[in-house]
Image: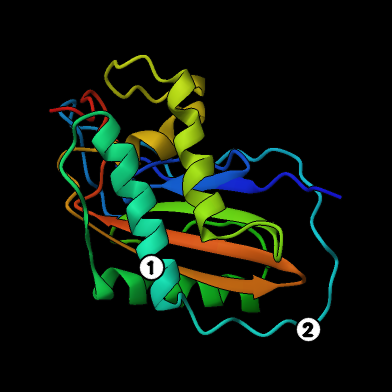
């Protein structure tokens, strides 16, 4: 049976938990857009079947081929709108892996890093969760890209529509230059975390500036 994945992202880097999750350090690191305000660190989630599974151990992270695939998917998406390619960052990848493993060890759900403390967010972030073995890191990137159909090209505004586009706009944000991603597995579910620097989704700006 096919299960719909979770997406989540944060603002100032992305903010969404569509069946993925997207986040930017807007709230966490206080990044502000031209309006001088940053989005709040909240996320919206679609209801999705999560495997009850048992004691999965966090994976050892992305293999070389997986890194190349998820980076290529980001850069293909950016090329389609004439944005320069991203470079892979091992530092961002390690940062993402810390959080992917923490999620697998604890809640086994999509949650963005907090505003402060040991796990404080410092970068933009997109999250994805789906059935392990059916979904892959490529599925995560393609899920974020699928929001393209809902984006009309305007500036980022923190409203309900943002939760339909935030992963995609972070992927194509012109001023973002580096990405690093990671994965973990818990209860039969794959978690994918990507972090971005500099973060995107600045309120009042478009990805093309």
Q: CA distance from mark 1 to mark 2?
A: 26 Å
Other residues around mark 2 within 10 Å, as few (<14) / some (14–19) / many (≥20): few
**Residue sitting at 44 percent across and 40 percent down?**
15
Number of other residues with Cα within 10 Å of mark 1, as a class: few under 14, some 14 to 19, many 20 or more: some
Q: Quadrant of the C terminus?
A: top left
The residue wearing badge 1 is 67
How far from the left and from the top, in percent, is residue 188? 76, 69
Please name whichever residue, 206 or 120, is drawn nearer the observer in this view of the structure.
206
Looking at the rendered image, the disc whose residue lies closer to the viewer, 1 or 2, is 1
43 w.r.t. 165: above or below? below
One can see residue 113 in this view: no
Secondary structure, mark 2, is loop
Q: Position of residue 148 (x, y in %)?
A: 43, 26
Q: What numbered label is drawn on residue 42?
A: none
- How many numbered marks, from 0 up? 2
Residue 65 relative to residue 57: left or right? left
42 w.r.t. 157: above or below:
below
Residue 66 can be seen, yes or no? yes
Q: Secondary structure at mark 1?
A: helix
Q: Label 2: which residue?
A: 55
Residue at 52% from the left image edge and 61% from the top image edge = 192
Q: Left or right: 64 with respect to 135?
A: left
Q: Quadrant of residue 48?
A: top right
């Amino acid at each position: 049976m096919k299960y719909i994945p979770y997406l989540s992202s944060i603002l100032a880097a992305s903010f969404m938990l569509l069946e993925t999750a997207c986040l930017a350090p807007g709230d966490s690191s206080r990044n502000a857009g031209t309006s001088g305000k940053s989005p709040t660190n909240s996320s919206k989630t679609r209801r999705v079947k999560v495997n009850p599974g048992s004691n999965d151990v966090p994976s050892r992270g992305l293999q070389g081929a997986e890194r190349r695939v998820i980076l290529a998917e980001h850069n293909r998406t950016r090329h389609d709108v004439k944005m320069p390619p991203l470079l892979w960052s091992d530092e961002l990848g390690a940062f993402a892996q810390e959080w992917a493993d923490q999620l697998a060890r604890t809640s086994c759900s999509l949650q963005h890093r907090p505003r402060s403390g040991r796990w404080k967010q410092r970068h933009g972030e997109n999250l994805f969760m789906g059935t392990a073995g059916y979904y892959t890191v490529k599925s995560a990137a393609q899920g974020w890209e699928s929001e393209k159909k809902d984006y009309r090209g305007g500036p980022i505004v923190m409203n309900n529509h943002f939760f339909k586009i935030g992963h995609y706009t972070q992927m194509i944000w012109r001023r973002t230059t580096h990405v690093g991603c990671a994965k973990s597995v818990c209860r039969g579910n794959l978690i994918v975390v990507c972090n971005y620097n500099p973060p995107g989704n600045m309120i009042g700006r478009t990805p093309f500036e």
